[in-house]
Image: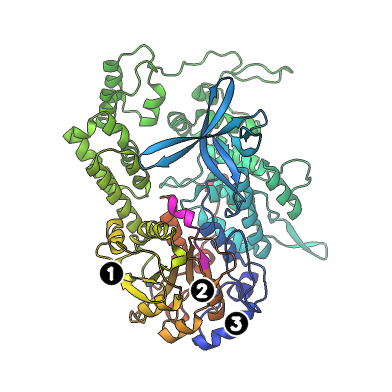
Amino acid sequence: MQFLRGLWGVLFIMTPHPMEERQANTERLTYLSTPDSNIEKVGTMNQENLGPLDRILQTVLAYTDHMVHNRPGTVVPDARAVTGLRWQAATYKVENGQKIVYNLQKSGRKSLRIRLGVLQDDAKVVSKDGIVLATYRGAGIFPEVAVWLYRQVAEVWKLDNEFAARWASYAFAQEHRDLKVVLAAFMLVQCRKGDPVRDDAKVAFFDEDFRDIGEAMMLLQRKDGRDLNPKLLLRVREVLRLPGVVEINRQLGFGRTARRPFFGRWDKAVTKWLHYREENPRMLEGLVKAGFRRSVMDLARAVGYRPQTPRFFEILRWKQCQADDGRRTMAIGKELVAAESWDGLVEREICERILRDKPSFKRIVGLLPREVGMTRAIVAASIDAGALSDKDLVIFTPTLEELGLMQVQAIRERWEKATRSVEDMRSANIARRVRNASTRAILEEASETALKKAVEETMKGIRVYFMVDISGSMEGAIDAAKTHISKFLHGFPLDKVHVAVFNTAGRELRIPHASSVGVQNAFRGIVAGGGTDYGAGVRALAHHKPSADEDFFFIFVGDEEAQAFDAQVRASGLQPMAFGFVKVRHSPNHAAVRDTAARLGIPCFIIDERSFEDAYAIPRTIRALVAATPVGNEHRAQPGARQDIAQIVLQTELLKKPPWAA
């Protein structure tokens, strides 16, 4: 495959050679750089096209913005962002006949409203002087992010079709929903669709059908809930409708025309999806109860679905009217059973219904009469009926606290059990919104536990050296660096991570406890000052030698205002497989860490500091960074050896459609 021929020469200059021999590879090394500068030259290094793995890493590590925002916001130019734009949650209020836009900004447990400007009819937000400050957008897809992600997939596809297909198959089982939607959209429209290949006018064989993978992503169901629900199926179509995506597809030659969006097999896959659920009415009923009724109707409208029986419309409570041309014949004018309603019920009657019928919490919220609202008794009844999952309970913590239910022993015990079982970083965000210190501490501990679970398996066979620049040029940025490290570092086991701070001298820091509190304590009293010698940080940790079965990488936090330090790395006797770099201060004329990586012939992965602001992105960033670190050749053949992401993707079996859709 093209991937095997070019990947390791493009991104990873592997380590079968001694450290000294890596220098000869410098001229052909390409590595990831900051999003705003893309690929940079170092010395005589040639600029080469990014390989498939580079694109995956750039997509996973550099991308922090959400592709969909479920609330309004403002968009402003931002050179640091890969899309060139930054989104900020916002709202507006009519004051003296003008729509005044306020940005919503978190400050501890409070949400601050910061006045921005006046909203115009063209969605521009302007100052009193008429200067355009931002663009106001409603809830929905962030087009620039979607197009950027789609372009990364397209670049991988152009370099290696099969690798892109295996990437989609691998991503389907992962948590990154936005990326899965984009990959599904791309695979549905790409040009490898099982066409016959002829030899002297005779069909010799049939080409690979990678559109089957896009169909499989839409049709397969997973027990862990990581499949594409009806809203995500609609989002796939929404991505393909974006002008930027239409243009990419036109350039790649997908579809018969460039005048309108090309949907490939989306319609076909949705028709199969709807037909299967019509034949299995309990699945359709389950979707209605789960709150996807309107999404299913939108899917049916989009493909012009024709049900086999009126039962399809009855389950969806979808009243049918005759078309102007009189073509419709099914369920026209038929009275449908009214949707269940709790209107007119008092609080006691609602609680009795909850305990009797045990509906999902989402359904309870949808049925509650506005005049009753979410009362203390209704929430308590919902918990007693098992309507709230562990994740729901954690999300609902501020409301439980506000209603005084955290003082009810049975509910408190149920909540504490839920916090111990959470498997994501949601608790970190929720902890900011609770008042009680002990409740906040439990949520923060749950978040740290979730992070450790997320990276525990990933960290097998790898060691991390973390080095933080505390020179004078870091004044004002050192506090941000400490905050980032406290969020990032407590996900690593203490026996697998070594930390140092440096200016012109370096010293090792001892982390007393594997928690954010422990990290903050270790950095207590450290202030910025002195010059910058990255080699001092390396020397401070040189006495920690990895075991024979371990790979390892260096992570630097700084601004790169220094000279290259490859000589010091060689002198240390440590041969890292890769560098990770968190740039916390803009210094466009300096590239000490990246220069050194190039001279050593190893990759340098840029970690966007904004990923630390998103609690959900932290474990994904850690896992991606560790998975991206090459596995040493001496370890690769060992039983149970760690695998890097290239190996994992290449070994992923291509998805197959479920038997009922074949």
Give the color scheme: rainbow, by chain, secondary structure or one colour: rainbow
- Which residue appears at 71% of the width and 17% of the height? 326
Residue 215 seen in the current view: no
Q: For residue 510, which numbered disc appears in the image? A: 1
Q: Position of residue 498 (x, y in %)?
A: 34, 71
- Which residue appears at 16% of the width and 35% of the height? 409
Q: Which residues are magenta?
A: 605-613
* SS class, disc 3: helix
Q: For residue 25, which numbered disc appears in the image? A: 3
Give residue 345's quadrant in the image: top left
Q: Which residue is mark 2?
A: 562
Amino acid residing under circle 1: Arg
Q: Position of residue 420 (x, y in %)?
A: 26, 48
Q: Vertical placement of 84 versus 27: above or below?
A: above
Give residue 491's quadrant in the image: bottom left
- Which residue appears at 78% of the width and 62% of the height? 198
Residue 89 seen in the current view: yes
Which label lies toward us, 3 or 2? Answer: 2
Mark 2 nearby-residue class (10 Å; few <14, some 14–19, many ≥20): some
Mark 3 nearby-residue class (10 Å; few <14, some 14–19, many ≥20): some
